[in-house]
Image: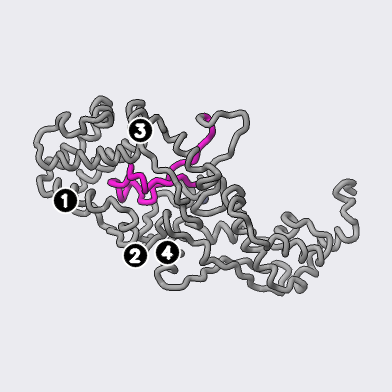
Amino acid sequence: MLFRLAPNTPSFEVFRLLNEELLYFFEQIVNSDTFSRVLFTQEAVGQACWDNKPTRDKFKGLWDSINAAGLRTKQQLLNTMQSNQNLQVFFGTPQRDLLNFMNEHCREALKLLCTHLYCSTKDLAPIITAAGGVDIKAHFNAYRAQTVNGNICKACGMEKLAPFRANTPDKDQWRADYDHQLCKSKYPIFAVHPDNLIPLCDVCNQDAKKAKDLFRDEDKKARLAFYPFNEEAKDYINIGFEQLHDPEPIIKVKWNAPDGTILDKLNTWDEVYEIRNRVEGQFRSLEAIIEDELNPNSLADVRRKIAGKARPLSPNTLKRKEWAYWYHKLFSELNLIDLAPFAAKWEFIQQQATDGGDYILNPP
Ligand SMILES: [Zn+2]
């Protein structure tokens, strides 16, 4: 994450209840050889899971395969689920082969169940009632309140979570999708863990991350990742310039990591969300940035405006405005360097100095 989550981030009660129900089911199956109502809690959530046929069928599917696999697998599943409920601890010492003790059948049935709990069961009316009436839209609105996390994606700082629409009640506002930090396909037991689900922008969630594993890279090499609730990348980033004497210097995102662990986490964050590619893509033309963001009429005006943009940003702006962190970082670095070598070649400055800006109102 570029920014850690706010300390007052609300937990989503529906996920907490479903996670508890799943854990209860794993406890009950250890000593049971029949699939029946007693495998579910006596509470409303247990009743809803039993009454809803598609949900019950997925529980039954897992029960069938795990019962065939035997007692040892049941005990290991329970033990794995119980001993990994603290995700902060898990991020510190990730268990990358969490479900290797299960056969393929069991793993597939577990994935089907957990995906179904996340995709469908969470929206059942009795479950939402049991969670105090807070459905996922209400949770999202509370999550992105300006006094909590704001509407900017915590992973990248480049995109809004979802646009606000005027004349639209809260319940009808658009929402962002929730990202499973630990993806459902490799870590299904965390599919409804309340600390594993974070609303992210579409680019981070759907284009960049998809089902990437936070703890293994493409070559299966082990790696670490920032824990979103208490770790962030924002203090370990620099913007650098290459080929400063060209009219178009190259803008680079660089790490400023104090140790190897932070460096590893920065590289994971970068690979998972394609941070550097996206920032360097946005910043591919310094000339265009100066023209679009500053609209200057002379080199002195460029310097003045860059100094203004380098002033510290309010935390509220960072929670409200997409790209604010990155442009501030860029202008802060630009404020420290001599622009004259390449600014002399910026045609639009000379043109504006000549035309005095009239050409905008009265195009030739
Ligand atoms: Zn994002």
Instruction: Kindly identify the residue that appears in the image at 56 percent across and 45 percent down.
Output: 160
Question: Disc 4 or disc 2, which is closer to the eye?
Answer: 4
Asked if the residue under mark 1 is in contact with the one under mark 2, i.e. CB atoms within 8 Å, the reply is no
Q: Residue at x 48, y 71 (%)?
A: 257
Residue 131: assigned label? 3
Residue pointed to by mark 2:
221
Mark 3 burial class by Cα count in 10 Å: few <14, some 14-19, many 20+: some
Contact, mark 3 vs mark 1 (Cβ under 8 Å): no
First to last magenta residue range: 172-200
Q: CA distance from mark 4 to mark 1?
A: 30 Å
Q: Which circle, 2 or 1, is nearer the viewer?
A: 1
Left or right: where 291 falls relative to 136: right
Type of amino acid under label 1:
Gln
Q: Secondary structure at mark 4?
A: helix
Query: Judging from the image, what secondary structure is the residue with disc 2 in?
Result: loop
Asked if the beta carbon under badge 2 is closer than 8 A to the nearest atom of ligand 1, the reply is no
Amino acid carrying mark 3 in the image: Ala
User: Could you tell me the amino acid type at mark 4?
Assistant: Lys
Q: Would you say the residues marked 3 and 4 are in contact, meaning their CB atoms lie under 8 Å apart?
A: no
Q: CA distance from mark 2 to mark 3?
A: 40 Å
Ligand 1 has an atom within 8 Å of the beta carbon of the residue at disc 4: no
Q: Is residue 175 visible?
A: yes
Q: Earlier in the sequence, mark 3 or mark 1?
A: 1
Asked if marks 4 and 1 touch (Cβ < 8 Å), the reply is no
Circle 1 is placed at which residue position? 76
Please tell me how crowded label 4 is: few (under 14), some (14-19), or many (20+) other residues with Cα within 10 Å.
Answer: many
Mark 2 residue type: Lys
SS at mark 1 in the image: helix
Q: Position of residue 256 (x, y in %)?
A: 51, 71
**Residue, x 41% and y 72% (percent of image)?**
260
Q: Position of residue 68 (x, y in %)?
A: 12, 41
